[in-house]
Structures are given as structure tokens and as C-alpha cells.
Amino acid sequence: MMISQSRLQRAVMEGRLWEVETIVRGERKAIGEAINNDDETVLHILVRTGHNYFLRKLLNLIKDTDADKDILKRKSSDGSTALHIAAITGNKIAADLLIKKMQWMMTVEDSYDHIPFVTAFLHMKLDTSVFLVKAIHKCLQNYKWRPEDLLMAFNLLVVVISSRKYDLALDLLNAFPNFTAKDTFELLMTLARDFPSGVGYYEKKIYPSLTDVRCMILKNTCCLLTPVQFCSSGALAEPVKDALSGIIRILIVLVIIPIMVFQLLFFLIWTVYLVFRIAYWALWNVARLILPSIRCIEKKVKEYEKAKEVLKKVFEKIDKLGNIDTQQFLYKEPLLEAARGNAYEVVDEILSRSPQAIYWKDKNGFNIIHLAVIHRSEKIYNLIYDNYVNVDRRSLYKEQLDSSDNNILHLVGRLAPSNKLKSRRGAALQLQRELQWSQELKKLADPAFISEKNMYGETPGMVFTREHESMVKEGETWMKNTAESCSITAALITTIVFAAAITVPGGSHQETGVPLFKKNAAFIVFAASDSIALCASTMSLLMFLSILTTRFAEQDFLFDLPNQLILGLCALLISTTAMMVAFGATLFLVFSHQKAWMLGPICGLLCIPITSFAILQFPLIADLILSTHSTIFAKPYSSRRGQLNRKGLWLFPDKLSEYILGFM
């Protein structure tokens, strides 16, 4: 019946919802009437257009009688219910309203035999699809899943993990308690392939976490009270009464009391730290509303933590399988893929369960050490070096690896993957990182490997030179262009400050040549800053000239050239700052005439070029310093399963007290 097509349809499409409500209240059956050529009802259109408030009002008009429930069963020409439309458009609020009104709508199929969650997944509305799956498990606990729907649910889980929506993945893992070995294998492969890289050291330090602070406070409180509980419980009194003398009791008390005092001070310090951390957390929340980079750090931290939870859940489901024979089937390919992708969390979990996996090889004969070297996966390399290769650290390097007789040094001589090279600033720093990898492997490999030839008669050094020939040329061009540009600036600064030193502001006495403003504090500032600018610019110019005259050999890019560039850029920054300070002092001397208020505008104007230059050049200087004077092979990615280091007990009073109490 198309009576609504004339009035109801126009009212819905034009957004005159009050008129729609008037029509529906007068004739409730109009809710279920088709009002367009696609046989859609007013519910379909309200869901599609997102009028959720009015949808709620219309659903309240529908009673629980069978006649009214038939209204919700109405389908469009393609067999879609209103819940299917909510799935297609990703309208979670409308889906929630419809489910609360009638739960069985979640299992109604359309013309393609798809229930709503499948429809949402096929239209890539992942949030809505996961919401519908959770609703089915919560509201319809006895629902018998069809095999094709279970397959779709598993595919949804894989896509959600690949999309790095780990909060949705956790919901799905909780909804489906059991997986087959094949399913867990695919999940592990997906995690190994797409596991987030995590956050850097400094990002982790600046990100505020009140949860970490609360846990630390509780931990130190428990450690503080442990000796008190031990002494007051009588556990110490009985052994001492029976077997120990009073002198030993005094000695034990003398050990425990300093520990308690030290831990009390430690607890007070952490309490003060908590106050500052809360204030920092408040400032962080203000900053993340303003600065996009802050929001990116927060997103990375939360994504990384959620990913670790998903990984833990997947391994819990693998442990439930209980079949040791399937471990190599489950772990081998994910382990090798994680080694290629630098996903050290996946590698650590697998090696902790199957230590022999360190010797597994791919079809080319490469184990995870070799893959970590080829793909420049420094986290994997550090993890294995520090935790799993502890008997003979060179045993994994003493093999002929492939059909071309390449050893580990031949492999590190290959050019790194493009995604690793792009993470470095400029060809010079890219070549430096390649040289650092080569130097690291030379320390571990058999010395005979350095001169060993493969089947093509090439030594590792020859392979490195051939693979990096174009990179050396690009690095030379990059260094020369940078040095030439900066040397011009340094020469100009040298000329300016030298001329300023000769023609001092305010002039000099004709007879003595002594500056007229020599007793003025601003003149002293001018003289000092001009001298600093002249010395720094001259040093900068010499550094850049030394770069231009170097031979640009491969090894020069490891330390010599980066250090010269660091000194040149730092000296240039200092000379620029000192020149602007000298210029400001000159302005103040000549034009202020005892007007102190001019100091503010002059300083404000001087800060603009200094700050601009520092902001533009600081990333390059920081990259150069970190790349040259820090190492990615510091082995920071140790396994969290390491044993207690008793050499460091005195640095950690909580461990010390636990050790003493455990010994007694």
C-alpha cells in the first residue's frame, strides 16, 4: 500500500520529523508500510539517514504484540531489515536500539543469506560488525552458528588485527573461546606480519600513565610493610627462640631496620613524585587537544599495549590446544615472519615456549638470526643475542648459509630493505647505519669470515662495496651539498661579525681609540657575543671545508664525516645565536638612550630567527648525534623472563628485602 508515499515519504526525506510522528501516531501501521520503490519502511530510512533520536521514539510506539512485531520483520526489495541497513551504514546506535527491541533480528537473513553482522563485515563496518557479534553471544547464548558465519567471524578477526584495531580483536577473542590449530596459526601469522613497532625510549618516558605510578606506589608500600609483617607474625621469633642466640636476633634487626627506613624514604619520594605525575598528566591532556604529535604518541602507546594483550590471548588459546607435536607447525612460519618484520614480542613468546625454534630455517636455509640481519631487525638481533644465544654465541654464525656459500658477513653486506633505508635522514646516515651493522657482525663472526669468498669469488667487503656503490655516491653528494650551503652561511657570518668588531657601536675616541660605550653593560654583551660569533663561525667554516676536501671513502661515513658535520652545524648554530645577540646589544646601545622598555621588543624580535634556525636544524643535529654516538646494539630488548640479577640488589631495596627474607 503506497498511501504513505505522498505524504509520509516527503516528511521523512525532508526531515519534518514532527509531521512523521503525527502521521504514525494516527495510524501506527504506517510504520511498516513501504514508502519508496525499494520497499523500504520509515524505519529503514530513519536508520539510513541517522535520525536515531526519532527512531527511538518510533520504536517506543511499537508494542510487544505479534502484530506490532511484524512491523520489524518488514524487508526491503533486497531482503534487508532495518538492522541490515544499520549494518550497511555502520549505525551502531540504531543497531543497539533495534536489538533491544527485538533480539532475534540479529539472526534474520537477507536475500543473500547474510545475517546483519556478515553484512556489516562485507561493507567493512568493522566496529558495527564486532558489536553485532558481541550482541549475539550476549543475548543469544544458545544460538547455533552456521559454519559459513563462523568462517566470516574468523575472517573478521583477521581483518581487525590487520587493521590494528586491537580493542575490537580482544572483544572477538573473548567471544570465541575455542580455535583450531589452523586458526591460531593464521592469527599468529597476522600478528607477526602486522605487529606495531611500539614507541621509542623518549616517547615512553614522556607519556604519562597514572596506572604505572599507582602500581609503583602499591608495590613499594607492600615492600615497606613486608619486614614489619614478618617480625610481628612470630615467624621470626620461634626459630630465633629455639635455635638462634640473642646476638643473631640483634643482627637481623639491625639489617631489617635500615631497610625499613630506606624504603620509607623511598615511599615518601614516590608520593611526591605522584603529585608531580598527576600534574603532568593534566598538562598532557591539555596538550593532546592542541598538538597532533601528542595525540600520535598516545595512539601509538595504546595501540602497542592492546596488541600485546591480543598476543597474550592468542598464546593462551594455543596453550589450551595442548598438542606439542603441532608446535613447529604453529610457530615456524610466524617466527620467521616476525624476524623479518622486527616483531620481537612475537619472537620472544615463541622462543620462551620452544627454545629449539632458534635453529629453524626457511626454504633458503636462513634462521632467525640471519633473517634479522638481512632485514635489519635490530630488536630481534638484540633479543636473541642477549637472552637465547648464551652457550656459544658464535655457533649460529659458523655455517655456510645458502647455495652461493654466503656467510653472515656476506648477508650483512647486502643492501638493507627500502623501508629500513627510508627511516634514515639522507644517504649519508643510511650508509652509516649499514656500516654499523657490518661492524657489529664482524665482532661476533669468525675472523676467517672476513676474507672468506662465496661461489662468485667475492669477500664480504666486496659484496658490501658492490651493493652500496650508488649509496656512497649519493652520500657524497648529500654531504657536499650540505657543507657547501652551510659554509656560505658561515662565511657571511664571519664577515659580518668581523666588520662589527672593527666598527664598534657608538664609535671610539679619536685620540685613544677606546670605545665610547666601554663602561656600558650592553657593550660588554656586544663584545662577548661578537667574539663568540667570530670564533664559532670560523670553526664552522673550517669544518665544512674539511668535509668538502675529504676523500669520501666508505669508512669515512662511519665516524669522521658525521662528527665533522655535527661540529660544523653546532658551531653554526652558536655563531648565529651569538651574532643576533650582538646585533640586539648594538640596537640597545644606539637607540635605547636609557629606555629600558626597548629591551623587551628587541629580545622578542631576536628570538624569531634564532628559534626558527634551531627548529629547522635541530632534527638533523639530533639524528646525527644519536646515530653516531649511540648504538642500536645496546641490547635493550631483553626478555622479561630473565632471572633476578643479584649484583644489582643494593640498587633495588624491594628486591633486597625479598632476598633477605627468602634466605632466612
Image (cartoon, grey):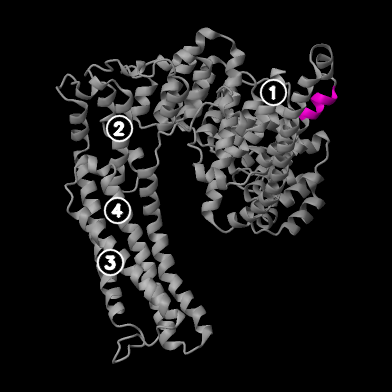
Residue at the farthest front position: 247
Whichever of labels 4 and 1 marks the residue nearer the N terminus, that label is 4
Residue 79's spot in the image, x, y percent? 61, 35
Residues under labels 4 and 2: Cα distance? 21 Å
Quadrant showing the C terminus: top right
Q: Amino acid at mark 2?
A: Gln
Near mark 2 (Cα within 10 A), the count class, few <14, some 14-19 or many ≥20, is some
Give the numbered dot on residue 565. Answer: 4
Residue marked by disc 3: 489
Q: Nearer the viewer, residue 299 or 175?
A: 299
Residue marked by disc 1: 660
Residues under labels 3 and 1: Cα distance? 64 Å
Residues under labels 2 and 1: Cα distance? 44 Å
Whichever of labels 4 and 3 marks the residue nearer the N terminus, that label is 3
What range of the chain is rendered magenta?
A: 226-233
Give the numbered dot on residue 626. Answer: none
Q: Nearer the viewer, residue 300 or 524?
A: 524
Residue 383's spot in the image, x, y percent? 46, 27
Residue marked by disc 2: 439
Quadrant in which residue 225 is drawn? top right
The secondary element bearing badge 2 is classed as: helix
Q: Amino acid at mark 1?
A: Ile
